[in-house]
Image: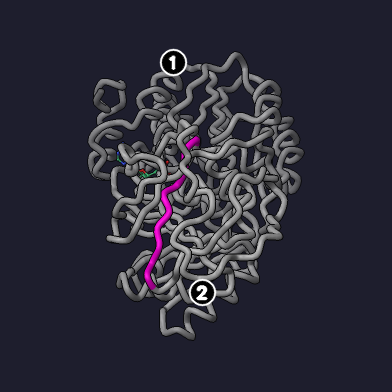
Amino acid sequence: MSFESLGLRAELLSAIASQGYTTPTPIQSQAIPVVLEGCDLLAGAQTGTGKTAAFALPIVQMLSEHKPKKKRRNPRALVLVPTRELAAQVSGQMQNYGRRLSLRSTMIYGGVNIRAQIERLHRGVDIVVATPGRLLDHVERRTISLAEIEFLVLDEADRMLDLGFIDDILQIAEYLPSQRQNLLFSATYSKSIKQLADELLDQPRRIEVARRNIAADAVTQVVYTVERSRKREMLSHLIRKGDWHQVLVFARTRYGADKLTDELLFDGITTSALHSNKSQSLRTRTLAEFKQGEFRVLVATDVAARGLDIERLPYVINYDLPQVPEDYVHRIGRTGRAGEDGVAISLVCPAEQPRLLAIEALLEYAIPQQTIAEFPAIAVKRGVKAKPGKPARSKQKPAKPGLAKTKSQAKSPSKAKAKTPAKAKGKAPGKTTTGRSGQATTARPAPKLGRRLSRTKPSS
Ligand code: AMP
Protein backbone atom coordinates (compact mmCIF):
# COMPACT_ATOMS: atom_id res chain seq x y z
CA MET A 1 0.00 0.00 0.00
CA SER A 2 1.18 3.54 -0.76
CA PHE A 3 0.38 6.90 0.84
CA GLU A 4 -1.06 7.99 -2.55
CA SER A 5 -3.66 5.20 -2.42
CA LEU A 6 -4.91 6.47 0.95
CA GLY A 7 -6.42 9.50 -0.75
CA LEU A 8 -4.24 12.15 0.89
CA ARG A 9 -3.77 15.60 -0.64
CA ALA A 10 -0.69 16.48 -2.66
CA GLU A 11 0.53 18.91 0.01
CA LEU A 12 0.45 16.16 2.63
CA LEU A 13 2.09 13.66 0.31
CA SER A 14 4.97 16.08 -0.17
CA ALA A 15 5.22 16.59 3.61
CA ILE A 16 5.37 12.81 4.05
CA ALA A 17 8.03 12.49 1.35
CA SER A 18 10.13 15.20 2.98
CA GLN A 19 10.00 13.24 6.26
CA GLY A 20 11.44 10.29 4.38
CA TYR A 21 8.42 8.02 4.84
CA THR A 22 7.94 5.80 1.81
CA THR A 23 5.19 3.39 2.87
CA PRO A 24 2.48 3.72 5.49
CA THR A 25 2.94 1.75 8.69
CA PRO A 26 0.13 -0.74 9.54
CA ILE A 27 -1.64 1.70 11.87
CA GLN A 28 -1.46 4.39 9.20
CA SER A 29 -2.83 2.23 6.39
CA GLN A 30 -5.69 1.05 8.60
CA ALA A 31 -6.56 4.20 10.52
CA ILE A 32 -6.28 6.91 7.82
CA PRO A 33 -9.20 5.57 5.69
CA VAL A 34 -11.38 5.11 8.81
CA VAL A 35 -10.77 8.70 9.92
CA LEU A 36 -11.33 10.09 6.41
CA GLU A 37 -14.64 8.18 6.32
CA GLY A 38 -15.73 10.11 9.40
CA CYS A 39 -15.94 7.16 11.81
CA ASP A 40 -14.93 7.08 15.46
CA LEU A 41 -11.87 4.95 16.08
CA LEU A 42 -10.59 2.83 18.95
CA ALA A 43 -7.01 1.94 18.08
CA GLY A 44 -4.64 -0.34 19.92
CA ALA A 45 -1.26 1.11 19.03
CA GLN A 46 1.70 2.29 21.00
CA THR A 47 4.43 4.85 20.45
CA GLY A 48 6.78 3.76 17.71
CA THR A 49 4.07 2.42 15.40
CA GLY A 50 3.62 5.71 13.52
CA LYS A 51 0.31 6.43 15.27
CA THR A 52 0.84 10.20 15.35
CA ALA A 53 0.77 10.53 11.57
CA ALA A 54 -2.14 8.05 11.54
CA PHE A 55 -4.38 10.64 13.14
CA ALA A 56 -2.56 13.89 12.26
CA LEU A 57 -2.67 13.41 8.48
CA PRO A 58 -6.40 12.72 8.05
CA ILE A 59 -7.39 15.36 10.62
CA VAL A 60 -5.32 18.03 8.86
CA GLN A 61 -6.75 16.94 5.52
CA MET A 62 -10.35 17.15 6.74
CA LEU A 63 -9.84 20.46 8.54
CA SER A 64 -8.36 21.94 5.36
CA GLU A 65 -11.44 21.00 3.35
CA HIS A 66 -13.65 23.63 4.99
CA LYS A 67 -11.71 26.35 6.67
CA PRO A 68 -13.56 29.15 8.44
CA LYS A 69 -12.85 32.54 6.88
CA LYS A 70 -12.36 34.47 10.15
CA LYS A 71 -8.83 35.09 11.34
CA ARG A 72 -9.38 34.59 15.07
CA ARG A 73 -10.78 31.12 14.87
CA ASN A 74 -11.58 28.68 17.62
CA PRO A 75 -9.87 25.28 17.61
CA ARG A 76 -11.61 22.52 15.67
CA ALA A 77 -9.31 19.65 16.62
CA LEU A 78 -8.22 18.77 20.14
CA VAL A 79 -5.55 16.18 20.90
CA LEU A 80 -5.23 15.23 24.56
CA VAL A 81 -1.90 13.74 25.59
CA PRO A 82 -0.47 12.62 28.94
CA THR A 83 2.83 14.52 29.00
CA ARG A 84 4.48 17.70 27.84
CA GLU A 85 7.04 15.80 25.82
CA LEU A 86 4.36 13.97 23.88
CA ALA A 87 2.52 17.26 23.40
CA ALA A 88 5.66 18.71 21.82
CA GLN A 89 6.11 15.72 19.57
CA VAL A 90 2.49 15.58 18.38
CA SER A 91 2.32 19.33 17.98
CA GLY A 92 5.48 19.27 15.88
CA GLN A 93 3.86 16.82 13.46
CA MET A 94 0.60 18.78 13.38
CA GLN A 95 2.53 21.95 12.61
CA ASN A 96 4.54 20.27 9.90
CA TYR A 97 1.41 19.02 8.10
CA GLY A 98 -0.87 21.91 9.00
CA ARG A 99 1.26 24.80 7.83
CA ARG A 100 1.27 23.43 4.29
CA LEU A 101 -2.50 23.91 4.30
CA SER A 102 -2.51 27.18 6.25
CA LEU A 103 -3.75 25.57 9.45
CA ARG A 104 -2.47 26.77 12.80
CA SER A 105 -1.63 24.49 15.63
CA THR A 106 -0.47 25.11 19.17
CA MET A 107 0.33 23.17 22.31
CA ILE A 108 -0.84 23.71 25.84
CA TYR A 109 0.77 22.18 28.89
CA GLY A 110 1.44 23.02 32.49
CA GLY A 111 4.67 23.93 34.23
CA VAL A 112 5.24 27.00 32.05
CA ASN A 113 3.86 30.51 32.16
CA ILE A 114 0.29 30.58 30.89
CA ARG A 115 0.46 34.05 29.30
CA ALA A 116 2.17 33.06 26.07
CA GLN A 117 -0.39 30.29 25.61
CA ILE A 118 -3.25 32.74 26.14
CA GLU A 119 -1.81 35.11 23.55
CA ARG A 120 -1.37 32.32 21.04
CA LEU A 121 -4.94 31.11 21.56
CA HIS A 122 -6.20 34.66 21.26
CA ARG A 123 -4.64 34.99 17.80
CA GLY A 124 -6.68 31.96 16.69
CA VAL A 125 -5.72 28.32 16.11
CA ASP A 126 -7.21 25.31 14.34
CA ILE A 127 -5.53 22.50 16.26
CA VAL A 128 -4.72 22.29 19.97
CA VAL A 129 -2.51 19.60 21.47
CA ALA A 130 -2.88 19.69 25.24
CA THR A 131 -2.31 17.97 28.54
CA PRO A 132 -5.66 17.77 30.38
CA GLY A 133 -4.87 19.80 33.52
CA ARG A 134 -3.64 22.97 31.83
CA LEU A 135 -6.36 22.74 29.20
CA LEU A 136 -9.00 22.79 31.94
CA ASP A 137 -7.24 25.78 33.43
CA HIS A 138 -7.73 27.62 30.11
CA VAL A 139 -11.33 26.46 29.84
CA GLU A 140 -12.09 27.77 33.31
CA ARG A 141 -10.38 31.10 32.56
CA ARG A 142 -12.35 31.20 29.29
CA THR A 143 -9.15 31.69 27.34
CA ILE A 144 -10.14 28.82 25.04
CA SER A 145 -13.49 27.80 23.61
CA LEU A 146 -14.04 24.14 22.85
CA ALA A 147 -17.47 24.76 21.38
CA GLU A 148 -16.32 24.24 17.79
CA ILE A 149 -14.28 21.06 18.26
CA GLU A 150 -14.91 18.61 15.43
CA PHE A 151 -12.17 16.11 16.27
CA LEU A 152 -11.19 14.79 19.67
CA VAL A 153 -8.10 12.56 19.91
CA LEU A 154 -7.10 10.80 23.11
CA ASP A 155 -3.48 9.85 22.54
CA GLU A 156 -1.87 7.30 24.86
CA ALA A 157 -5.17 7.08 26.68
CA ASP A 158 -3.94 4.28 28.94
CA ARG A 159 -1.15 6.48 30.20
CA MET A 160 -3.54 9.36 30.80
CA LEU A 161 -5.59 7.04 33.00
CA ASP A 162 -2.43 5.84 34.77
CA LEU A 163 -1.61 9.44 35.55
CA GLY A 164 -5.05 10.02 37.04
CA PHE A 165 -6.45 12.27 34.29
CA ILE A 166 -9.81 10.50 34.02
CA ASP A 167 -11.82 13.21 35.81
CA ASP A 168 -10.14 15.98 33.83
CA ILE A 169 -10.89 14.18 30.56
CA LEU A 170 -14.55 13.67 31.43
CA GLN A 171 -14.82 17.27 32.53
CA ILE A 172 -13.27 18.48 29.27
CA ALA A 173 -15.73 16.33 27.34
CA GLU A 174 -18.59 18.31 28.87
CA TYR A 175 -17.37 21.42 27.07
CA LEU A 176 -17.26 19.71 23.67
CA PRO A 177 -20.09 19.69 21.15
CA SER A 178 -21.90 16.34 21.01
CA GLN A 179 -21.44 16.14 17.24
CA ARG A 180 -17.78 15.33 16.79
CA GLN A 181 -15.42 12.58 15.63
CA ASN A 182 -13.51 10.77 18.36
CA LEU A 183 -10.27 8.82 18.07
CA LEU A 184 -8.78 6.94 20.99
CA PHE A 185 -5.27 5.48 20.88
CA SER A 186 -4.06 3.20 23.62
CA ALA A 187 -1.27 0.67 23.95
CA THR A 188 -3.47 -1.54 26.14
CA TYR A 189 -7.17 -2.38 26.42
CA SER A 190 -7.97 -2.41 30.09
CA LYS A 191 -11.45 -2.34 31.59
CA SER A 192 -11.07 1.38 32.28
CA ILE A 193 -10.10 2.08 28.66
CA LYS A 194 -13.24 0.25 27.55
CA GLN A 195 -15.31 2.35 29.96
CA LEU A 196 -13.72 5.54 28.66
CA ALA A 197 -14.38 4.46 25.07
CA ASP A 198 -18.01 3.65 25.92
CA GLU A 199 -18.36 7.07 27.47
CA LEU A 200 -16.79 9.14 24.69
CA LEU A 201 -16.85 7.18 21.43
CA ASP A 202 -19.80 6.49 19.15
CA GLN A 203 -19.79 3.03 17.54
CA PRO A 204 -16.03 3.12 17.01
CA ARG A 205 -14.23 1.03 14.43
CA ARG A 206 -11.56 -1.05 16.16
CA ILE A 207 -8.02 -1.46 14.94
CA GLU A 208 -5.21 -3.24 16.71
CA VAL A 209 -1.68 -3.27 15.37
CA ALA A 210 0.91 -5.74 16.55
CA ARG A 211 1.70 -4.49 20.01
CA ARG A 212 3.82 -7.06 21.61
CA ASN A 213 6.08 -7.99 18.76
CA ILE A 214 6.68 -4.58 17.32
CA ALA A 215 9.54 -3.93 19.69
CA ALA A 216 10.99 -7.40 19.36
CA ASP A 217 11.14 -7.21 15.59
CA ALA A 218 13.50 -4.27 15.50
CA VAL A 219 15.14 -4.47 18.91
CA THR A 220 17.72 -6.92 20.18
CA GLN A 221 16.81 -7.50 23.81
CA VAL A 222 19.30 -8.71 26.37
CA VAL A 223 19.22 -9.34 30.11
CA TYR A 224 22.34 -9.22 32.28
CA THR A 225 21.89 -10.55 35.78
CA VAL A 226 23.98 -8.55 38.20
CA GLU A 227 24.11 -7.71 41.88
CA ARG A 228 22.35 -4.44 42.59
CA SER A 229 25.58 -3.08 44.09
CA ARG A 230 27.46 -3.71 40.82
CA LYS A 231 24.90 -2.28 38.41
CA ARG A 232 26.52 1.08 38.10
CA GLU A 233 29.94 -0.48 37.52
CA MET A 234 28.45 -2.72 34.82
CA LEU A 235 26.71 0.18 33.15
CA SER A 236 29.90 2.23 32.98
CA HIS A 237 31.73 -0.82 31.68
CA LEU A 238 29.21 -1.44 28.88
CA ILE A 239 29.14 2.19 27.79
CA ARG A 240 32.91 2.54 27.80
CA LYS A 241 33.83 -0.80 26.33
CA GLY A 242 31.21 -0.54 23.60
CA ASP A 243 32.15 3.13 23.04
CA TRP A 244 28.44 3.86 23.08
CA HIS A 245 27.12 7.32 22.43
CA GLN A 246 23.47 8.35 22.78
CA VAL A 247 22.40 5.91 25.44
CA LEU A 248 19.00 6.29 27.08
CA VAL A 249 19.01 4.83 30.59
CA PHE A 250 15.83 4.27 32.56
CA ALA A 251 15.81 4.67 36.32
CA ARG A 252 12.69 4.04 38.37
CA THR A 253 12.73 7.13 40.55
CA ARG A 254 13.78 10.73 40.22
CA TYR A 255 16.19 10.34 43.09
CA GLY A 256 17.69 7.25 41.45
CA ALA A 257 18.06 9.11 38.14
CA ASP A 258 19.92 11.99 39.80
CA LYS A 259 22.14 9.66 41.80
CA LEU A 260 23.08 7.61 38.75
CA THR A 261 23.75 10.77 36.75
CA ASP A 262 26.23 11.92 39.39
CA GLU A 263 27.89 8.51 39.46
CA LEU A 264 28.32 8.33 35.70
CA LEU A 265 29.70 11.85 35.65
CA PHE A 266 32.14 10.73 38.32
CA ASP A 267 33.13 7.87 35.99
CA GLY A 268 33.90 10.45 33.28
CA ILE A 269 30.82 9.73 31.15
CA THR A 270 28.91 12.83 30.08
CA THR A 271 25.38 12.40 31.43
CA SER A 272 22.22 14.36 32.19
CA ALA A 273 18.98 13.47 33.96
CA LEU A 274 15.45 14.01 32.65
CA HIS A 275 12.57 13.79 35.06
CA SER A 276 9.54 15.69 36.21
CA ASN A 277 11.37 17.55 39.00
CA LYS A 278 13.26 19.53 36.36
CA SER A 279 11.74 22.67 34.94
CA GLN A 280 10.16 22.39 31.51
CA SER A 281 12.73 24.68 29.91
CA LEU A 282 15.56 22.59 31.35
CA ARG A 283 13.92 19.37 30.11
CA THR A 284 13.53 20.81 26.61
CA ARG A 285 17.13 21.98 26.56
CA THR A 286 18.46 18.69 27.92
CA LEU A 287 16.59 16.72 25.27
CA ALA A 288 17.79 19.02 22.47
CA GLU A 289 21.40 18.64 23.66
CA PHE A 290 21.04 14.86 23.87
CA LYS A 291 19.66 14.75 20.34
CA GLN A 292 22.62 16.80 19.13
CA GLY A 293 25.03 14.39 20.79
CA GLU A 294 26.36 16.93 23.28
CA PHE A 295 26.46 14.29 25.99
CA ARG A 296 26.39 10.51 25.91
CA VAL A 297 23.88 9.31 28.45
CA LEU A 298 20.40 10.53 29.29
CA VAL A 299 19.02 9.05 32.51
CA ALA A 300 15.24 9.31 32.50
CA THR A 301 12.21 8.19 34.48
CA ASP A 302 9.25 6.60 32.70
CA VAL A 303 6.94 9.55 32.85
CA ALA A 304 9.55 12.01 31.62
CA ALA A 305 10.55 9.72 28.77
CA ARG A 306 7.03 9.17 27.55
CA GLY A 307 6.67 10.51 24.05
CA LEU A 308 10.37 11.09 23.48
CA ASP A 309 11.13 10.80 19.82
CA ILE A 310 14.83 10.59 19.27
CA GLU A 311 15.82 9.53 15.80
CA ARG A 312 17.80 6.31 15.55
CA LEU A 313 18.48 5.91 19.24
CA PRO A 314 20.79 2.88 19.31
CA TYR A 315 20.79 1.88 22.99
CA VAL A 316 18.18 1.75 25.71
CA ILE A 317 19.20 0.44 29.11
CA ASN A 318 16.85 -0.54 31.91
CA TYR A 319 18.95 0.26 34.92
CA ASP A 320 15.91 -0.61 37.01
CA LEU A 321 13.13 -2.77 35.64
CA PRO A 322 9.80 -0.95 35.55
CA GLN A 323 7.08 -1.76 38.07
CA VAL A 324 4.45 -1.89 35.35
CA PRO A 325 5.35 -4.57 32.76
CA GLU A 326 3.86 -2.54 29.87
CA ASP A 327 6.38 0.21 30.60
CA TYR A 328 9.11 -2.17 29.49
CA VAL A 329 7.56 -2.24 26.01
CA HIS A 330 7.28 1.55 25.99
CA ARG A 331 10.86 1.93 27.11
CA ILE A 332 12.40 -0.33 24.53
CA GLY A 333 10.19 1.30 21.91
CA ARG A 334 12.61 4.25 22.20
CA THR A 335 15.11 2.27 20.18
CA GLY A 336 14.80 0.43 16.89
CA ARG A 337 12.35 3.06 15.76
CA ALA A 338 10.94 3.27 12.25
CA GLY A 339 12.89 0.42 10.75
CA GLU A 340 16.21 1.03 12.52
CA ASP A 341 17.89 -1.66 14.59
CA GLY A 342 18.36 -1.08 18.30
CA VAL A 343 19.62 -2.77 21.44
CA ALA A 344 17.68 -2.85 24.71
CA ILE A 345 19.61 -4.05 27.72
CA SER A 346 18.19 -4.79 31.15
CA LEU A 347 20.40 -4.97 34.22
CA VAL A 348 18.49 -7.28 36.52
CA CYS A 349 19.37 -7.95 40.14
CA PRO A 350 17.97 -10.94 42.05
CA ALA A 351 15.28 -8.87 43.73
CA GLU A 352 13.96 -7.84 40.32
CA GLN A 353 13.32 -11.38 39.09
CA PRO A 354 9.56 -11.22 39.71
CA ARG A 355 9.43 -8.10 37.58
CA LEU A 356 11.39 -9.78 34.84
CA LEU A 357 8.95 -12.70 34.94
CA ALA A 358 6.00 -10.34 34.66
CA ILE A 359 7.57 -8.64 31.64
CA GLU A 360 8.33 -11.95 29.96
CA ALA A 361 4.78 -13.13 30.63
CA LEU A 362 3.51 -10.01 28.90
CA LEU A 363 5.88 -10.46 25.97
CA GLU A 364 5.10 -14.19 25.85
CA TYR A 365 8.74 -15.02 25.40
CA ALA A 366 11.88 -15.15 27.48
CA ILE A 367 14.43 -12.41 26.93
CA PRO A 368 17.85 -13.88 26.11
CA GLN A 369 20.43 -13.57 28.87
CA GLN A 370 24.08 -12.73 28.34
CA THR A 371 27.08 -12.65 30.60
CA ILE A 372 30.23 -10.56 30.52
CA ALA A 373 33.49 -12.06 31.70
CA GLU A 374 34.09 -9.23 34.18
CA PHE A 375 30.66 -9.78 35.77
CA PRO A 376 30.03 -13.48 36.33
CA ALA A 377 26.39 -14.52 36.16
CA ILE A 378 24.70 -14.71 39.52
CA ALA A 379 22.16 -17.26 40.60
CA VAL A 380 18.62 -16.02 40.79
CA LYS A 381 15.43 -17.64 41.92
CA ARG A 382 13.29 -18.51 38.91
CA GLY A 383 9.77 -19.83 38.77
CA VAL A 384 8.39 -17.58 41.49
CA LYS A 385 5.05 -16.03 40.82
CA ALA A 386 5.34 -12.37 39.94
CA LYS A 387 3.39 -9.79 41.83
CA PRO A 388 3.16 -7.02 39.28
CA GLY A 389 3.02 -3.55 40.69
CA LYS A 390 4.68 -4.45 43.98
CA PRO A 391 8.35 -3.88 44.57
CA ALA A 392 10.07 -7.19 44.17
CA ARG A 393 11.59 -8.98 47.14
CA SER A 394 13.69 -12.04 47.02
CA LYS A 395 14.87 -13.78 50.12
CA GLN A 396 17.24 -15.91 48.16
CA LYS A 397 20.88 -15.19 48.67
CA PRO A 398 22.90 -14.91 45.49
CA ALA A 399 25.12 -17.88 44.82
CA LYS A 400 28.87 -17.66 44.81
CA PRO A 401 30.37 -15.80 41.86
CA GLY A 402 31.49 -18.04 39.06
CA LEU A 403 28.20 -19.85 38.48
CA ALA A 404 27.70 -19.82 34.74
CA LYS A 405 23.96 -20.38 34.75
CA THR A 406 21.00 -19.70 36.98
CA LYS A 407 19.38 -22.66 38.70
CA SER A 408 16.46 -22.85 36.35
CA GLN A 409 18.62 -22.44 33.28
CA ALA A 410 20.66 -25.38 34.42
CA LYS A 411 17.51 -27.52 34.46
CA SER A 412 16.41 -28.38 30.97
CA PRO A 413 13.34 -26.31 30.24
CA SER A 414 11.95 -28.75 27.71
CA LYS A 415 8.31 -28.40 28.84
CA ALA A 416 7.99 -24.77 27.97
CA LYS A 417 6.66 -23.73 24.60
CA ALA A 418 8.45 -20.42 24.63
CA LYS A 419 8.05 -17.89 21.91
CA THR A 420 11.32 -16.09 21.40
CA PRO A 421 11.91 -12.56 20.21
CA ALA A 422 12.65 -12.14 16.53
CA LYS A 423 16.39 -11.90 17.04
CA ALA A 424 16.44 -15.02 19.17
CA LYS A 425 14.22 -17.10 16.91
CA GLY A 426 15.56 -20.48 15.94
CA LYS A 427 17.51 -20.83 19.15
CA ALA A 428 16.53 -23.73 21.37
CA PRO A 429 15.48 -22.70 24.86
CA GLY A 430 18.34 -23.05 27.26
CA LYS A 431 20.93 -23.28 24.54
CA THR A 432 23.86 -20.93 24.79
CA THR A 433 24.54 -18.96 21.64
CA THR A 434 26.51 -15.89 20.74
CA GLY A 435 24.80 -12.53 21.16
CA ARG A 436 25.19 -9.36 19.12
CA SER A 437 28.08 -8.21 21.19
CA GLY A 438 29.82 -11.56 20.99
CA GLN A 439 28.94 -12.50 24.55
CA ALA A 440 27.28 -15.68 25.72
CA THR A 441 23.52 -15.69 25.30
CA THR A 442 21.05 -18.04 26.93
CA ALA A 443 17.54 -18.27 25.51
CA ARG A 444 15.09 -19.30 28.22
CA PRO A 445 11.51 -20.52 28.32
CA ALA A 446 8.72 -18.02 28.73
CA PRO A 447 7.53 -17.79 32.31
CA LYS A 448 3.90 -18.31 33.17
CA LEU A 449 2.04 -16.00 35.46
CA GLY A 450 -0.50 -17.49 37.80
CA ARG A 451 -2.74 -14.46 37.57
CA ARG A 452 -3.58 -11.57 35.35
CA LEU A 453 -1.33 -8.59 35.22
CA SER A 454 -2.65 -5.44 36.77
CA ARG A 455 -1.58 -1.87 36.26
CA THR A 456 -0.32 0.48 38.88
CA LYS A 457 0.55 4.12 38.97
CA PRO A 458 4.10 4.88 37.82
CA SER A 459 6.44 6.11 40.46
CA SER A 460 7.34 9.45 38.93
P1 AMP B 1 4.99 7.49 16.51
O1 AMP B 1 4.47 6.12 16.76
O2 AMP B 1 3.98 8.37 15.88
O3 AMP B 1 5.62 8.07 17.74
O4 AMP B 1 6.16 7.36 15.40
C1 AMP B 1 7.34 6.68 15.64
C2 AMP B 1 8.43 7.02 14.67
O5 AMP B 1 8.13 6.49 13.38
C3 AMP B 1 8.68 8.51 14.44
O6 AMP B 1 10.09 8.68 14.48
C4 AMP B 1 8.14 8.79 13.08
O7 AMP B 1 8.85 9.84 12.46
C5 AMP B 1 8.36 7.47 12.38
N1 AMP B 1 7.39 7.17 11.30
C6 AMP B 1 6.05 7.39 11.34
N2 AMP B 1 5.48 6.94 10.20
C7 AMP B 1 6.45 6.43 9.43
C8 AMP B 1 6.49 5.80 8.12
N3 AMP B 1 5.37 5.64 7.40
N4 AMP B 1 7.67 5.40 7.66
C9 AMP B 1 8.80 5.57 8.39
N5 AMP B 1 8.85 6.16 9.61
C10 AMP B 1 7.69 6.57 10.14
**Dominant secondary structure (helix, strand or loop) of the stretch shown in magenta:** loop
Badge 2, how many Cα within 10 Å: few under 14, some, many 20+? some
Residue in the foreground of this view, choosing between 359 and 310? 359
Q: Secondary structure at mark 1?
A: helix
Q: What's under tag 1, amino acid-wise?
A: Glu
Quarter holding residue 314: bottom left
Contact (Cβ within 8 Å) of mark 2 with mark 1: no
Question: Please, is residue 140 above or below residue 152 in the view?
Answer: below
Q: Is residue 126 left or right of residue 197?
A: left
Q: Position of residue 118 (x, y in %)?
A: 62, 53
Task: Find residue 37 and name its label.
Answer: 1
Q: What's under tag 2, amino acid-wise?
A: Arg
For residue 367: magenta? yes
Q: Which corner quadrant of the figure contains ligand 1?
A: top left
For image coordinates 65% across by 24% down, the residue present is 197
Q: Is residue 135 left or right of residue 399?
A: right
Q: Is residue 113 left or right of residue 286?
A: right
For residue 351: magenta? no
Front tag of 2 and 1: 2
Q: Secondary structure at mark 2?
A: helix
**First to last magenta residue range:** 364-373
- The residue indicated by pointer 2 is 232
Q: Residue furthest front?
A: 411
Task: Find residue 411 and name its label.
Answer: none
Location of the C terminus (image quadrant): bottom right
For image coordinates 61% across by 44% down, the residue present is 383
Question: Please, is residue 37 above or below residue 262 in the view?
Answer: above
Residue in the foreground of this view, choosing between 68 and 179? 179
Q: Position of residue 20 (x, y in %)?
A: 24, 43
For image coordinates 39% across by 56% down, the residue present is 310
For image coordinates 68% across by 55% down, the residue present is 392
Disc on the earlier residue, 2 or 1:
1
